[in-house]
Image (cartoon, coloured by chain):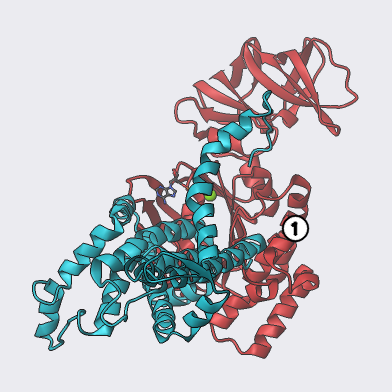
Amino acid sequence: MAAITLESVGKTYAGGVTAVHAIDLAIEDGEFLVLVGPSGCGKSTLLRMIAGLETISSGAVKIGNRVVNQVEPAERDIAMVFQNYALYPHMSVRENLAYGLKNRGVPKDEIARRVAEAAKILEIGGFLDRKPRALSGGQRQRVAMGRAIVREPAAFLFDEPLSNLDAKLRVQMRGEIKQLQARLGTTSIYVTHDQLEAMTLAHRLVVLNGGRIEQVGTPLEVYRKPASTFVAAFIGSPAMNLLQAEVSGGRVRLGGASLPAPGAAEGKVTLGLRPEDLQRTRPGAEGALLMNVAYVEELGAQRLVHGTVGGQSLVCAQPVESDLGDTLTLTADPAAVHLFDAASGKRLG
Amino acid sequence: MSTKRNTFRHRTLPYLLIAPQLVVTLVFFMWPAAQAVIQSFQQEDAFGLSTTWVGFQNYQALFADPDYLNALKVTVVFTLGVTAMSLGLALLLALAVDRMVKSATVYTTLLVWPYAVAPAVSGVMWWFMFNPTIGIFPYLLRMVGYDWNHGLHGTDAMILVVLAASWNQISYNFLFFVAGLQSIPASLREAAAIDGAGPAKRFWTITLPLLSPTTFFLLVVNFVYAMFNTFATIHATTQGGPAGSTNILVYKVFNDGFIGLNLGSSSAQSVVLLFIVIALTVVQFAWVERRVQY
Ligand SMILES: Nc1ncnc2c1ncn2[C@@H]1O[C@H](COP(=O)(O)OP(=O)(O)O)[C@@H](O)[C@H]1O
Ligand SMILES: [Mg+2]
């Protein structure tokens, strides 16, 4: 087990594409860190540089106290779980698990012991002698995990390991990965484009955008205090409403409405309001948002009301039994009002 | 494969449409094959005036003939030589191209060119390069003290025809190997690299096993090529000599039939070859059915 440190790590591909810009990041020993961001933001590139599958263009990657820039993947003491699982199709599950140990000259009885243990943990003992193609997606996923844990590496690297599974299995495996990591306490870096996966798994998550870090923090920190409009729109479902507004005299104003403004901003801003933070208030209330309802989505546990405020679209979450008219009068707690710089998108206050 | 079915309004149209191919097959393949089978049971007198029915005598004579047994042996050596050489080199080249990031397409194109050269032409080219008096290779070999003369030494002649025949086939094998390598997901080799397998170990334990369907297919294709499609190469280089040391079965059929005019024996030899082709085809199909390995 080891800490992993990235010191201004950057990657420019041969074609001239800079996929990762000088990233600094310290991953603690035993931490579950999730790299999250939209497709193409450089998550896989960063992970593959840590694994040694991609050369590092600039900066240094440290595993433990050792700079590993020039170290072969095999010698970095990491294990990786690939999106397509990358199971060796011509080997049985047992051989897949044993392959990495055999290559390292681990004694036979030790291999057998570790394979049996991993099989027990992941409940794959029943099909150790099958070939991968005779397994379901979920079972393959477990075997891929098994191949990582038999090695007892210093760190696990996951590259979107659940995105080939159906929704139900994904939720189940998500839980299992979380428990497994907690139980083994192995430093893990997990790449995903799914913000829900990131929120549920991470000790800390790193939001990447265009090869740069937008924000690092615990899931709650990132949810409660998004550092930019990008993070605000990316983390949380349904997504945060972002509206053009103006601050004057300590109040955010849009249309005829005004809300208490946090901090000391003035002038044009982007106002962020999470749909779940908008509450109904009595019609005609002072400064309330007047929302014209366009349509309603029933989600079962709640309903999402889509509409407009002062010509800008807005979504708010409402309890299912609420009776809705053509307009809703809404307000938000001062703590739930997020303000961002209108030009740069950076958080204000 | 499409499951869409077209129906013709005229009953005869489909038959008309396949008729040209059927006619060609019947006239140029079925008819001669049938002739060969019939002739293999007959013997013609020296002047070609009368034929007599001799049953299996041609076959018995064949397998008692030291020349024929020699040709059988030569064919085995030649076929194994050509297959090993053209598969081995093609795989090496394909692996090299597979590692290339930039100019892979240029190399691929260049490496495919030899396939477009007619075997007779490439045969002549090799004949020039290895000509004991004017060729470049005998000249170089003499400098290291080897006296190359494929007109006198059977081994030299065998090496020459194996080289010449392989050269044509490498391009074909190369293309299939490149395609085969490209169908192996990069993540498998990456996973193996993380699993502590070096390049050599990755090749033997991951790449080669996953290439086995391609390799097996090419093995059969190359057997068939070496045994049946190398007539022009042999004809342009050694003509089966010296002393029958490169006289493969197909070349012997031609020699005995068209030069020696022993049609009965030549036909019997053709029929033996026919059975070899059938056997190879059956093996090939049986294997394709099983979808190989994993
Ligand atoms: N081998 C490569 N050569 C050139 N560009 C690449 C290569 N791999 C990825 N890229 C580019 O780098 C950027 C980041 O890719 P990637 O790390 O795969 O993103 P993500 O995993 O976040 O979807 C993308 O713009 C992608 O097109
Ligand atoms: Mg990716």
Tell me: residue A314, above or below residue B218. Answer: above
Q: Residue at x 52, y 23 (%)?
A: A269
Q: Is residue B163 above or below residue A134?
A: below
Q: Quadrant of the C terminus of chain B?
A: bottom right
Residue A232: in sight, yes or no? Answer: no
The front one of B214 and A63 is B214
Q: Amino acid at mark 1?
A: Ser
Image quadrant where residue B101 sits: bottom left
| The colour assigned to chain B within the rendered structure | cyan
Which residue, given by chain and number where applicable, does mark 1 sit on? A136
Identify which residue, B88 or B35, lies in the foreground: B35
Q: Residue at x 64, y 18 (%)?
A: A313
Q: Identify which residue is drawn at 17% across, 73% down.
A: B130
Is residue B287 rendered to the left or right of residue A9? Answer: right
Q: Crowdedness of circle 1 by 10 Å Cα count: few (<14), some, many (20+)?
A: few
Q: Residue furthest front?
A: B49
For this view, does B180 lie left or right of residue A189? left
Coordinates of residue A33 in the picture (x, y in percent):
59, 57
Estimate the x, y position of residue B280 in percent, counting from the top left.
55, 67
Which chain is the one coloured red? A
At a point 63% along the width and 78% down the height, the residue shown is A98
Q: Nearer the viewer, residue B133 or B266?
A: B266
